Image (cartoon, rainbow, N blue to C red):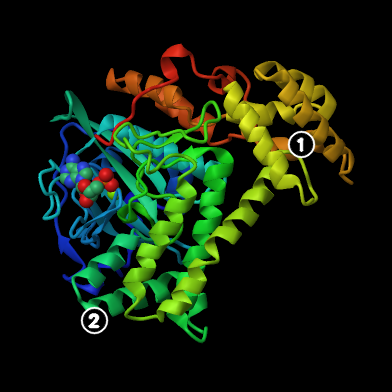
Amino acid sequence: MKALDQLTFDNRFARLGDAFSTQVLPDPIAEPRVVVASESAMALLDLDPAQAALPLFAELFSGHQSWQDADPRAMVYSGHQFGGYTPRLGDGRGLLLGEVVNDAGEHWDLHLKGAGQTPYSRMGDGRAVLRSSIREFLGSEALHALGIPSSRALCVIGSSTTVWRETQESAAMILRLAQSHIRFGHFEYFYYTRQPEQQQLLIDHVLEQHYPECRSAEQPYLAMFQTIVERNAELIARWQAYGFCHGVMNTDNMSILGITFDFGPFAFLDDFDANFICNHSDDQGRYSYSNQVPIAHWNLSALAQALTPFVEVEALKQALGLFLPLYQTHYLDLMRRRLGLTTAEDDDLQLVETLLQRMQSGGVDYTLFFRRLGDQPAAAALQVVRDDFVDLAGFDAWSATYLARCEREPANAEGRRERMHAVNPLYVLRNYLAQKAIEAANGGDYTEVRRLHQVLSRPFEEQPGMQAYAERPPEWGKHLEISCSS
Ligand code: AMP
Ligand code: MG
């Protein structure tokens, strides 16, 4: 276990040069204090958890102190935002502090969000508010605990600095960890500004550092693109299966590693609703829950476009064509497991889709339905969940099909509960839970944020005394408006 001053840096991205990033020092926020820290994220850097209690911890992650070997930089990228191309975005309020090499030899980017203005800030103040920093912290750590690939969060640091959004709010910083912060938008930037040499450097960097297994392929760049397609198909399948809505799937928010990245107005479904739009600013529903699948494909085609100087168009199209079938395979596999099924039958997709239609019309809680279904043998469990449906005849018809399907399972009732509870969480980050924790934190009380983080770090395990975190939202918490403002 290491102390904070024992971290080893190897800043590979910074070494790509000034065409890729600009040196900027963090602009500190006043009176820094630790709101919450993640022990499991600290472990990725081999950091002793006790380090979070030292004054140095809050100072390092609020811009007051730095490491000699860090090389803080704002990265340049562009991206398609809500379908339209913005030629230059970049880190407007975040800095890549440096890359830490852990004892296992892995590189982890330390990325400090809310670190002040950069050449890419445009009209922004370079800050992040406490509210959105807490949401990103809880969201990324919760996804990780659910087994959904995501950037990680080391800590949130609060302060007495204030910023103006719709109203006055407190500024905060969040330290994000990922093995890379390179986005689809990085590739688009060098493509649309016609800088083939820099683009080549970028592609080779990503290939070498993040997709080394593709180097020996006949066409390494194509193999890398295909792997990115595969990873995204799996990622989106997990989002859909667990009801995660990202909210702002612009290409600048899509990680080249295929992990969940750049959290804005995200949400987990409460009641199942295929048309759910979590981003209050998304009037057209471009990024609605069910649109996440075609949008991921669209984003991958934007990346493919940026790769056309290096890979043949036909080959890129073929690789893109893998997305939907792969997505469907992963999604169906996950949903079968959520239903307690261990074998595959032809009508399984139909079984899932019919269930979702019934849930949609009945306003059934997406998380609790599967959890309760696994509580008991199928016939008994169905009697319990039945109460939540409005169209009982419709539900009974589905029930009969499901029951018959369960009876054809070789694994049958044996181990059903354990198997299902291992894939069906009891606790997810519901918006109203985040909201309660944020309100307390805005008043200076961080215990609720910390408790919620603890509960969500073991989402599949029933935790004594934590029943309140497994409840459907109260009336006030059902339709909270979460906007892009953060
Ligand atoms: P986001 O919506 O967080 O993905 O950000 C989109 C773009 O706007 C990125 O280039 C951000 O760095 C930039 N941005 C967002 N908020 C701010 C802010 N408060 N100050 C400066 N830049 C910002
Ligand atoms: Mg972004």
Badge 1: residue crowd in 10 Å (few <14, some 14–19, many ≥20): few
Which SS class for mark 2?
A: helix
Q: In this view, does 35 lie above or below 310?
A: above
Q: In this view, does 470 lie to the left or right of 352?
A: left
236 vs 318, nearest the viewer: 318
- Residue 120 is situated, as x and y percent measured from the top left of the image, at 14, 54
- Give the CA separation, mark 2 to mark 1: 54 Å
At x 56%, y 55%, the residue is 234
At x 36%, y 78%, the residue is 204
- Residue 164 is situated, as x and y percent measured from the top left of the image, at 14, 29
User: Can see residue 423?
Assistant: no
Dot 1 beta carbon under 8 Å from ligand 2: no
Precedes in sequence: disc 2 or disc 1: 2
Q: Which of marks 2 and 1 is in front?
A: 2
User: Do tag 2 and tag 1 residues touch (Cβ < 8 Å)?
Assistant: no
At x 77%, y 24%, the residue is 396
Query: Residue 418 got which mark?
Result: 1
Q: Is residue 94 above or below residue 453?
A: below
Which SS class for mark 1?
A: helix
